[in-house]
Every structure is written in C-alpha cells, then in structure tokens.
Image (spheres, coloured by chain):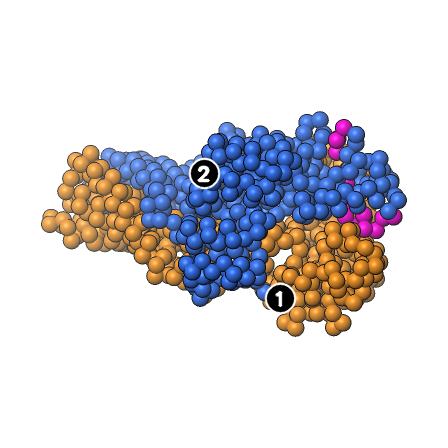
Chain colours: A orange, B blue
C-alpha cells in the first residue's frame, strides 16, 4: 500500500548515487511520494543526499525539504548556496519556506529572499517572518483563496483556477469585503453545487471560526480539534484576513507537543533521538541525572545526620526505598492528572482550592493503604516497633507528595513554564528528599530508644 | 472568537432549565456550535442535560452525542429509551453511530437499529459493527462519494448533490470500477475546474494511498500524517472501497494515544480525570502504588539482609537514595528514547544489537560522571573508604538500568503489550531493587571490614 524502505532498496539507491546514475535515480524517485524520499534522505550521508536532491524537480525537492527534520535539513542545506536554494524556496508553501529560512543565518536568509523569482512569494515570506513560531501567525500560510463578497460563483471559480497551482489544498473560499475584512466562507462543496451566476453574498456562510495572529499555537490546535476544522483563517486585530492554518500543520504541532511532554516527564533535557551520537544523547540525559544525583545526595546528608539512630536500629534503613519511591510515584501521578486537566479547556476550570481538597482526600486513602502494607511488613521482618513510624511516615509522604504534585504544575503554569516539568525526575527527587526527612523525624519522635 | 463557558452563563442556562423555559434555551443554543453545547452538558446533571438535549434538533443532538465523552454519554443515554435514541442515531455519521451503539447493551443496540428510519444507515451500521475499534475498519465511516470510472464530471456533480446531506465533508470523489474496486480519486478542486462533459476516466488520479480494513489504527494515523492526507479510503482485501477515515477522527486517535502514553508513564492504571470522584481516582492510582510498594519492600528485604554491614558502617545507608533514584531515572530516559524510535517508522529500524551497544556507551559516560559526583561526596561526609563502593555501584546501576530500559520496551513491543509501561513506576521500582542489591554486594566485596 505505502512505500516501505528496505536495506536492499537503500543499497541499490546508494550504488546508483555513487555511479552518478541520474536516469535510474530519477526513475526510482518518480515512483515515490516526496515523504518517502525524505525517509531515504535520512539514511544517506550529506553528499549523497545533496546529489539525490539536485536530480529532482524543484516542486518535489521543495516538498521534501519542507518535510525534513530541521537538524538534518540544516546539515544538508549547508552544502547548498543561496542561488541553489532560491528556486526551491520559490515554490514552497510560504509557511514551510519561513520555517526553513528561520534556521538559516540572517545573511543567507536575505540573499535567498532577494533571489526569489516569484515576488509574491517574497512578500509572503517577509510578512510571515514577523511572527513568533509559537503563535497562530507563525503557523499560518499565506496561500489561500479569497473572494470579494460582491462577486459571483463564476468569478470564484476563475479565482480558484488562477490560484490552483499555488494553493495545494482548497477546502473553502474565504469571503472578504472591499478592505479585506473576513466576512465568512463558501465551502468547495457548495461551489460545486451552486449555479455559476449565483452571488457570493447570497450563499456564503457568515458563521465562521477564526483566530487572531497572536493566539498561542496550542490554543489554535485545541480550537481546530474541538470544532473538527480542516483549516482555520487567521486575521489581524482589525479582522483582516491574513492567512490560514491547515490541519496537517496542527497535527504536527499536536504530535510534537506530546513528544515534548513525554520527553520532559522522562527527564530528557532536549530533543534527541535514540540513534543520535553517543555524545548527543549523553548531553541530553546528564543534566537530569546530575540534578537527580544532587537531590539524592542532599537526602544522603539527611540520612547521614541520623547515623546514630541507624547505628541503634539498622532496620530503619530498610524503609528508605519505599519512602523515596512512594513519594516519587504519588508526585508523578498527581501532577500528571493536573497536567491533563490543564490541557482540557472545554469545560469550566476547577478552583485550585477544591482541586487540592479532593487530591488530599485521595491521598489519605492511598496513604493509609500503602502505609498499612508497609506497616505489616515490619512484623514480617521482626521489627514491629517500626510499625507506627513507617505507617505514619508513608501517610505523611503521600500527603506531601500529593500537595507538591498539585501545587507545582499549577504554579509553573501560572508563571508560564511548561508544567510537564513537574512530572520530571527533578520533582520526583524533591519528593524523595522531603520524604526521607519526614521519615527520620517521625522515627525520632516515636521511638523512645533513639 | 470562540465560545467560552462562564459561571454566569452556566447558571443562566441552569435557571432556564429549572423553569423549563424552552424558548430561551432554544434561542441560546441556536447561537452555539454543537461542540460548545457538549461543553455545557459536562457541567449539568443528567436530568438537566437530558432536558436540554431533547429541546434540540435531531441533527444538532446527534452531533453533540457524537462529541461527548463515552462515560458521560453512557450515563446520559441511560435516561433515554430506544425509541427516543433512534431518531438521533438515524442522522449520525455511521462511525459515530457505531461507537455509540457499541457502548450499549446488545438488546438496546438491536432495538435501535431496528427502529432506524433510514435503512441505508442501518445497513452501514451493521457493516461497521463487525470491526474491532483498533483497526482501520473500526475507525472508518461509510459516508463517502464514489463514482463509476465510466461516467462524466456532470454525473459526479449530480452524485455530490444527492449525497450532500449525508456526507458532511467532501475532500474528493473516489473512482471505482463496475465491481466497486477502488481505482483512484478526483479532488473536489479538480471537479470545480473541469469541464462538465469531461470523462472521469480522463481526469482521475490513479496514484492513491489507501488502507485495508485490518490495518491497526496507529498505522493509519502514521500514514495520514506522513502523507498529509485529509481522508484515506479503506478497502477490503479484494481492493473494494468500503469506507473512508477522515483526519478529524485521526487527530482524536493521536491525542488519545498521547494521553494514554503519559498516563501509563505516570503510573495511572486506567483512564481517569482530575475531577473524577475520590474513589475513582484512588482506584486508578492505588494499583501502581501497591506494585511500587511491593517492589520497594523487596528492596527492604535486601537491605535488611545487610543489617550487620549497616551496623558496622551506618553511612552505607546514606547512598541508598542515589542508587535507587539514578537507576529509576536512567531506566525512564532510556526506555523513553526506545519508545520514541519505535513510534517513528519513517526510516530503517536499527538492529537491536546496535541499539544496545550505543546505549551502553552512553551509560558508561553517564555512569562515570554520576559515580564521580557521588564518589566525591563520600569525602565530604568523611567516609572516603566508601568512594570505590559508591562509584562502582553507580556505574553498574547505570549500565544495568540502561540495559533494562532498552530491552524491556523492545520485548513488550514484540509480544504486543504497550511498551510505554516500561517507563512506568513498575520498571522504575525494579531498577531500584536491582540497584540496591548490586550496591550492597559491591560493598561486601570491596570493604574488608564487612
């Protein structure tokens, strides 16, 4: 059904590249979709990828470049000069062109824009370069079909014909007034079914969902998902139509956001892939490991302060792992629930006080159950005098970790930091540390012999 | 721009419901999109929601029901009898109708299907009920527009006109032969621009991406995302066109999958929301907490076995937290990288041997750094004789946790279990346990006085 890259196929392509066999390569690539060729480029070295790319039509090459992972693209494009890149950027969708240009040094960016044959494309790009990549303006493309409200269906079809090459996906035609203010839309289905002489004013849909350029990208994603939209028009504060965002770009945003959240929860400090170099991976893994180590060494300091207690009752050490891991697990669970509810904006949001109360009630139940299990275990290892210490400490730890797991993401969210970090190893370690302090303090309080 | 639910608005609606003020409610709901009304239903009790829903047109009601969270929907629909539900199911998209019916008891399901006025809808539903929900067949809808290859653009437009009400989103018209085999498609844009008398055979696009009914849903999502598709046709093994999957449903699948992964990584054993009842939350959190507790109590047994060692050198206990947390953190990082690369099927997959080798190289670097930091700390607390023990143990722990973090998700994936569980607290605790065993064994080996 779809193309699947095999070792055999890849080595055939690599052989053809080393022989500079342009005919074979063109024929092979002709049978593939651009997205599949992107997959092949990942497996080639930069020189091979460059050679293959230069064999292809500009349209195909542009689409491949738009698909490529930014890190790979940057390496690959370093071997191209501005005169080689301009024809590719010339035929790209404006949003993809801007993404690509934003990765380049300012000098190269300006050179390429100066070399663009399509001056409308150059204007589009200059417009889009103003926006941050995390707002609607940074995600939109300028390619869209719009029509003045005073025209007819026939004029509309002519406009589609004229723009057909520039605008790949047409879901609907946007309707604007004389100053370009967005009034509504006509779906392509309606245009197919309408009489050619019908007036746009009579048939267009005034009930339209749009976003302003400054809206955050995740809000755009949420709106498009809630209303099942294929594309959403983007307007400025005066309501003038500036561009549109299509669902495929939003799908990419959703996927990236999910990957980033998982990365943060997993304690990876940056984007990295499993097949990156050993150094690249180590660089991303080490910061959290070191932060975690420092946290645990603080816990070590606490434990070291209770050496004389441990000297008297060595079995106290046996419960250090359960105190630490329970605190960590409860913290992750709680903050993950808060994260999920922060992401869901469809209903009314719960007031923080009520959240906390409910979470603490859950914590009481969970703390009592886990405390009881661990408490019973003290009998098993013949240390029943530790029962009250272990049970009380676990209840306290579950309560504290639930509190931290609720408050931390809410606070981070308030000050504009990705609240997913609250589920990361850092907080886990903080809970670990607090838990151990509480454990030994309770031991000191409850055990007469210490 | 879009509707935002406020407390004031909600209490106005609730007042109108308690007064049975149908006129006000109909007027208010008329101004909203179905997705917004769904948001309101979440905040109402079942009786209020039922009343509001019965006031609305069937088309609007059907769309609201299709949007609703299954748990809420089940409660709400328990107050409806089959004769009340049938008119709503009658006008739903077939895929949504099947999702809703699958939640109902078989008796209700058959009653409703029997009561459907639209017999084509009944046939659609009976067709779709055969498929599991996690394959393409379970995600597809029967509503689509198809045309015989021997007809003309004009016939195609007539077909669109006839189906316009049933098929909400038309991206393209699928082209089939006399036995219904999928041959290709014509985009709606092409239809708008084509001459009415043009033959479909001359203008249709033969180069088409499709899926078979039995393909797993995540494969469908990956394909649609890779090729930026708005809809994908679904065929049976003979290549006959059976339905289509639209991008909005795939976006929902992607979002749910991401939420589920984060849930699993966070140690929540089932779907739960922060504002569920205290019991519901505890039920989902406790299984992992207990599993974690049992793991940590095994670690306690190990530590308890080294009581005499701890009695001699109480400071050994101080490094229990860093051993445990480092093992856990490395395990999560490694398995999360493997997960990410399992999800990415665009290139060649790395052979397991090479993965492991690279991961272990990263582990050597990370283990040496963390081991050194903790080793230096032994001097700080005046326990330099613990330096070789702590440093060696940490290196061993990082290596072991990296090994486990690589192998576990690969094995789980091979035997068909969601590999995200390898990042969960269970594996973290397993790493914790192994780490502590290794630590005390190394202490026994290296410290002459034990």
The percent position of residue B12, horizontal first and vertical second, equals 45, 64
Residue assigned mark 2: B422
Q: Is residue A233 above or below residue A280?
A: below
- Specify the label residue A212 is tagged with: 1
What residue is at 71 percent from the left and 26 percent from the top? B238
What residue is at 52 percent from the left and 42 percent from the top? B85
Q: Residues within 10 Å of mark 2 (few under 14, many from 20)?
A: many
What residue is at 46 percent from the left and 50 percent from the top? B50
Foreground of the two, A166 or A34: A166
Residue ranking furthest to the top: B238
Q: Chain of mark 1?
A: A
Residue ranking furthest to the left: A448
The percent position of residue A229, horizontal first and vertical second, equals 63, 53
Q: Is residue B146 above or below residue B22?
A: above
Magenta residues, start to end = B179-195
Judging from the image, what secondary structure is the residue with disc 1 in? strand
How far is mark 2 from mark 1, CA to CA?
A: 42 Å
* Left or right for B221, reference A125: left
Foreground of the two, A29 or B15: B15
Residue B239 occupies which quadrant of the picture? top right
| Quarter of the image that includes the N terminus of chain A | top right
Q: Chain of mark 2?
A: B
Judging from the image, what secondary structure is the residue with disc 2 in? helix
Membership of B193 in magenta stretch: yes
The percent position of residue A4, horizontal first and vertical second, equals 68, 35
Residue B437 occupies which quadrant of the picture? top left
Q: Is residue A381 above or below residue A91?
A: above
């Amino acid at each position: 059904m779809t193309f699947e890259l095999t070792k055999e196929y890849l080595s055939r392509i690599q052989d053809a590249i080393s022989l500079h066999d342009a005919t074979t390569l063109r024929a092979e690539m002709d049978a593939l979709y651009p997205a599949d060729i992107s997959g092949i480029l990942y497996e080639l070295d930069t020189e091979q990828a460059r050679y293959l790319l230069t064999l292809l039509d500009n349209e195909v090459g542009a689409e491949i470049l738009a698909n490529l992972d930014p890190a790979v693209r940057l390496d690959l494009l370093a071997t191209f000069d501005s005169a080689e890149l301009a024809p590719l950027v010339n035929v790209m969708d404006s949003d993809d062109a801007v993404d690509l240009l934003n990765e380049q040094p300012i000098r190269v960016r300006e050179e390429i824009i100066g070399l663009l044959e399509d001056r409308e494309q150059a204007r589009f790009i200059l417009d889009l370069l103003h926006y941050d990549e995390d707002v609607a303006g940074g995600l939109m493309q300028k390619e869209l079909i719009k029509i003045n409200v005073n025209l007819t269906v026939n004029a509309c079809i002519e406009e589609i014909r004229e723009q057909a090459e520039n605008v790949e996906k047409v879901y609907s035609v946007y309707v604007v007034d004389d100053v370009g203010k967005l009034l509504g839309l006509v779906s392509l289905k309606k245009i197919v079914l309408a009489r050619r002489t019908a007036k746009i004013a009579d048939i267009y849909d005034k009930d339209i969902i749009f976003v302003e350029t400054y809206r955050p990208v995740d809000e755009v994603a949420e709106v498009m998902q809630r209303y099942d939209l294929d594309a959403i028009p983007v307007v400025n504060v005066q309501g003038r139509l500036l561009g549109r965002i299509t669902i495929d770009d939003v799908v990419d945003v959703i996927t990236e956001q999910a990957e980033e959240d998982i990365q943060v929860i997993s304690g990876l400090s940056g984007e990295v892939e499993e097949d990156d170099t050993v150094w690249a991976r180590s660089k991303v893994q080490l910061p959290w490991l070191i932060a975690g180590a420092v946290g645990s060494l603080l816990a070590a300091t606490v434990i070291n302060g209770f050496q004389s207690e441990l000297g008297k009752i060595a079995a106290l050490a046996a419960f250090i792992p359960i105190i630490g891991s329970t605190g960590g697990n409860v913290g992750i669970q709680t903050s993950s629930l808060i994260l999920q509810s922060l992401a869901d904006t469809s209903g009314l949001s719960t007031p923080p006080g009520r959240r906390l109360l409910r979470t603490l009630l859950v914590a009481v139940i969970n703390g009592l159950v886990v405390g009881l299990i661990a408490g019973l275990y003290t009998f098993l290892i013949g240390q029943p005098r530790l029962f009250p210490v272990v049970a009380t400490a676990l209840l306290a730890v579950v309560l504290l970790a639930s509190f931290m797991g609720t408050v931390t993401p809410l606070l981070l969210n308030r000050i504009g930091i990705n609240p997913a970090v609250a589920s990361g190893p850092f907080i886990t370690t903080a809970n670990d540390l607090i838990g151990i302090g509480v454990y030994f303090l309770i031991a000191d309080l409850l055990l007469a012999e210490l």
